[in-house]
Image (cartoon, helix red, strand yellow):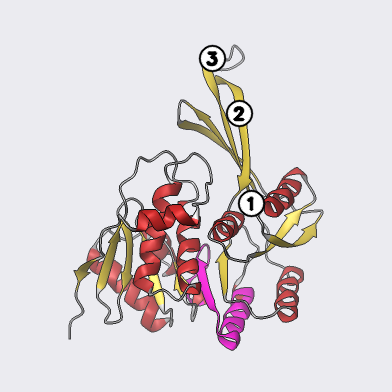
Amino acid sequence: MVDVSMSGLIERISPEAPVPVFLKKQEVISLGGAGNVAASLSSFGLDVTLLTLVGKDNSGSHLERLSADTGIRLQAMYDPQHITSTKTRFWCSNQQVFRADQERRLTCNMAFRNFVDEHLRSQTAYDSIVISDYNKGTLDAGLIADLVNYSIQNKCYLVCDPKGLSVESYAKVTVITPNLREAARLLNQNSFAFDNHIIRSTLIQFRHFYSIENPVITAGDIGIYYLDAENNLILQNSIKAHLADPTGAGDTAIAAITYGLCMGESFESCVALACAAASFTVTHVGTSPCPLAEMQSRLETIAKPTKILSSVK
């Protein structure tokens, strides 16, 4: 995915229709979606390979260039019928006024599944795999099952930002990072009330019914909820920051958790890293990978996690 941020001015209404006229002043093109996760991991100093489906279009060319500039090893399957997903956000006076998307959602086909499987078989085992699909159709339950089997056989971490599938598809992954609405959808429910007992119950279902070792629920500027080894509900509070743009905060968080796992950190420390890095990203317009030094600096100021609900013996 490619993200485009258009900054400009709105000073008049169009004579053709009652809509504002946007005068473009600046355009910034950056990696989005899984590309932004990869860019964040690269900014933390990790060696990163990005497996993706790319169209033969301008956005696909941008994705290639940006990956090379960011030090990402791009392994792409090219499909002339595919449209590289692009989100263009229009900004005026530090406010987003409009967003235009360009994409063609597809159904994952065997060609892409085989492409991923062949790549994994040809490589030395990775330390971790991150799944970030944004429900664009490049992933299905079959491909995720292949990745789960690979992670178990090669003893690598499998970290998932779940979209569009039920929780059964993510059974036995290492980490999932839904927000509360996404967590409800994983369990085939429309919504959950924001209630600590419901959050803990949901996380316990993920861990014990679906063998997901470290499920979390992200809660924006509140922080990240997770379970300790005794199934106590823990909240890692966010660092208070001036919100400029939440775009990419989830990508940054999942990248920081993955970095912590690769570095051998405790899961508590991984979640703290996620909150520290995300507090940087939200202060910038557009997708902005957090530098490693910045994440480490912010980690020094983060509050200790709070036990919200205790496990009943």
Q: Is residue 11 left or right of residue 209?
A: right
Q: Would you name the residue on which mark 1 appears?
A: 1
Residue 178 got which mark? Answer: none
Out of 142 and 133, give the one closest to the viewer: 133
Q: Within 10 Å of the Cα at label 2, are there few (<14), some (14-19), or many (20+) other Cα atoms? A: few
Q: Would you name the residue on which mark 3 appears?
A: 13
Q: Within 10 Å of the Cα at label 3, are there few (<14), some (14-19), or many (20+) other Cα atoms? A: few
Nearer the viewer's eye, disc 2 or disc 1?
2
Q: Any magenta on residue 149? A: yes
Q: Position of residue 78 (x, y in %)?
A: 79, 59
The residue at the point 38 percent across, 54 percent down is 297
Kindly report the distance in space between the C-alpha atoms of the residues bearing marks 2 and 1.
20 Å
Q: Secondary structure at mark 2?
A: strand
Q: Residue furthest top?
A: 15
Q: Which residues are magenta?
A: 142-168
Nearer the viewer's eye, disc 1 or disc 3?
1
